Amino acid sequence: MSLRDPFTIPTPSQVRPVGRAPYWTPGQTVTWTFRRFDFDRDLAEVARPMRVIADGPSGSVLWLAGGTPTQETRIVGWEDTNAHDVPLKARFRPIAEAPTRINVEGTWRGRGVLKIVPPEVPFSVWVLLKDAQDDVDRPESGGVQVEWYINLETTHRRSDDALFTSDHILDITFPIASMPLHAEDGRLDPTGAVFKDVDELAAAANFGAWPKEWSEIIRDNGSHLLDHLGDFGWAFDPEWETAARDLVGKVRLGAASVSEKSFDQEHRAIPNGCYDRQHR
């Protein structure tokens, strides 16, 4: 099999795939937009302003700093509750009974996230940065904990100032320290992979929010991806972790007087250089 989209999402008429020119400019701000398959019903969408770190034929790399104001969505009747905390049976209703969603103001928590988006695939790779829990024992961490994360999503389309996709609920994490994504010999190792939100993906089908086939396609995408990680070596290059740590170090509150603009000027070669690497 190959990776495939279970459904399409509404997008503006003038969009193009990631990896196709004209490209965004490093330092430009674009809006990462999550739209549900039924977006036209409520017009509720997640919208996060992200800074372009690199963009070219291999894909796009975008940065969202911790504390950035965002637009999130909530379910009517549960406005003060993160959607992930709403009971599954209330969230995943058949279309005729589906809860109404609204846009609300939000903020990105944590230190930041670097998102790497290969062209024409239904996923993106996230380098998540959080406050380290064990920085006393690991002073070299700089107080930052890094997690590699695969977000299964609708194949991305982009305009001149925005990217459009849809969250497929299921994610892949690598939480076991002894079995990291990046093996010591340079291989990408799926051994420690853990699927996240499996119960939510099942609920979407079991409670009638969407066809069972959609959940099956998404599960198959995740399994296929883990079996073919080496096909996407550019997106998983360890250099992206280095770039993400540098971004946090340069812009965190109280850091030395180095602006985001000067970071772009000094370090643009780090992420752009990854375009020349061969897949691992």
Image (cartoon, grey):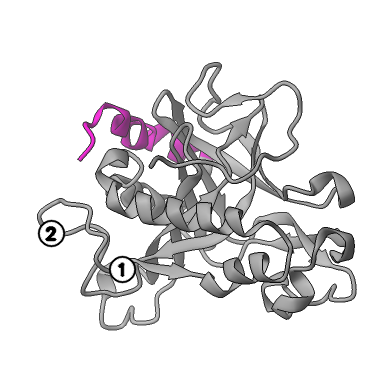
**Residue range corresponding to the magenta coloring:** 261-280
Q: Position of residue 96 (x, y in %)?
A: 88, 60
Quick check: 45 left or right of 173? right
Whichever of labels 2 and 1 marks the residue nearer the N terminus, that label is 1
In the rendered image of this protein, does residue 43 appear above or below residue 161?
A: below
**Quadrant of the rendered image containing residue 193:** bottom left
Q: Does the magenta stretch include residue 271?
A: yes
Residue drawn 73% across the image and 80% down it = 87
Indicate which disc residue 184 carries. 2
Name the residue beneath numbered marker 1. Answer: 141
**Type of amino acid at the residue the image marks with label 2:** Glu
Q: In which quarter of the image is the N terminus?
A: top left
Residue 146 visible in this rendered orientation of the protein? yes
Question: Residue 232 at what x, y percent from top left?
Answer: 32, 40
Residues under numbered marks 2 and 1 in contact, where contact means CB atoms less than 8 Å apart: no
Nearest to the eye among marks 2 and 1: give it: 2
Residue 99: x percent and y percent?
86, 66
Q: Which amino acid does label 1 sit on?
A: Ser
Pick the quarter of the image with the C terminus. Answer: top left
Residue 240 place in picture, x, y as percent? 35, 47
Q: Nearer the viewer, residue 168 or 78?
A: 168
Up/down of 117 relative to 137, above or below:
above
Instruction: Reply yes or no: does residue 59 show up in magenta.
Output: no
Rate crowding at label 1 as few (under 14), some (14 to 19) or many (20 or more) other CA atoms within 10 Å.
some
